Amino acid sequence: MGALSKNISAVEPSQTLAIDSTAKALRAEGKDVIGFGAGEPDFDTPENVKEAACRAIAQGYTRYTPPAGDIKLREAVAAKCLRDNGLSYSPEQIVISCGAKHALYNAVMVLCNPGDEVVIISPYWVTYPAQVIMAGATPVYVGTGPENGYRLDAARLRKAVTPRTKAIILNSPSNPTGWVASDAELTEIAEIVLERQLYVVADEIYEKIIYPPAAHRSIASLGEDIKERTVVINGVSKSHAMTGWRIGWLAAPPDVAKLSSRLQSHCTSNPTSIAQAAAIEALNGDQGFTAMMTGRFLDRRDYLLRRLNAMPGVSCYVPQGTFYAFPEIAGTGIGSDAFASELLEKALVAVVPGRAFGRDSAIRLSFATSMDNIRNGMDRIERFLKERA
Ligand code: PMP
Ligand code: GLU
């Protein structure tokens, strides 16, 4: 009997999901926990989307679809890419998966061979290194920091690229920092990608959760040549408050899409037919919901940032997108793991330690929770810091 898979054994369980589960379990025990852990909108899925799913059930739309997803949904995604991003894809270039996380996994599996390297911009979403390792490849990090708004330094990126580099993962707007890549940064990344014939995996799941004057631009829209080296990842989880429905996708050059579909045909087959019907309505129906939700996130962001930046030992970059704040806590003298666990134990406030995202001097708070929770949570953190001082 041999050991279990080295690649899977090498990764930790998802910390973002683990902290959310802990907070929910404590709440079920009757503890008054305020959760800033969950990276999911606290809004309910819009009514028109729910109704589309009910109709799908009533009409017996309950069978297998093609493994890459219903052609109507792939057409709706193609129309969305054209409408929102100026990107022209045929439905064959689109693969619908069980959430953006699954689409990312397909992309990494299809792009990488064992021994390849994948460049990840740090701080990074916790799942990127895990997926790269599971594919038998090696993550290589390029650091960015709050001192200059997490700006990506092209020289550092260039230095991280070796003959073994296969791809760069770009997440803008970024979870956890809230950085939004400027056109200049996108152009610099594209230049390196084209020069070294790499791929860029562009995770654009927070595209719609963005605060003016910041604006989203897909790197694939810089030109036909970079589009041919880009795998765009997106989904309805964040934009339409549909995290539980599990619908995401990739839009990619034909060969990458074809292999993703092949991979998926052996792993999961299609994502749930009913959720696909709901996603068609999410993409083709009225888009007012997303703007309303983002407006509410902006109010919460502004309040949360004011409170955080007034706390001793804490300083926070103002996120330009997403619903995360990623304050530096080094001034408190506590590491991120200890900070998060003490805060949960003593103040009943759940946050994610920055270490999970490659930055131990920070913690991540999701402000996708009510203003009341944010107010109470900030009071508790303030009290916690005062008592500890
Ligand atoms: N990418 C990033 C950066 C995320 O934060 C998330 C949130 N879970 C995902 C991808 C995955 O989204 P989904 O729920 O659609 O799998
Ligand atoms: N993306 C969210 C987060 O970072 C949800 C949890 C997850 O999928 O990891 O918290």
Image (tube, grey):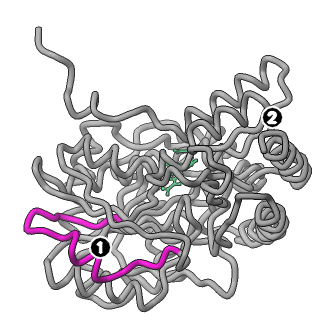
Q: Quadrant of residue 256?
A: bottom left
Report x, y in % for residue 68: 34, 52
Residue 173, compared with residue 38, is above or below; it is below
On the picture, is 34 further left or further right than 162? Answer: right
**Residue under the point 61% across and 47% down:** 243
Q: Is residue 378 magenta?
A: no
Report x, y in % for residue 118: 24, 59
Report the magenta residues as a range: 150-169
User: How many residues crowd around disc 2 within 10 Å: few (fewer than 14), some, or many (20 or more)?
Assistant: many
Residue 17, compared with residue 36, is above or below; it is above
User: How many residues crowd around disc 1 within 10 Å: few (fewer than 14), some, or many (20 or more)?
Assistant: many
Three-letter code for the amino acid on which mark 1 is drawn: Thr
**Residue under the point 77% across and 66% down:** 309
Identify residue for label 2.
347
Identify residue for label 1.
230
On the picture, is 184 further left or further right than 114? Answer: right
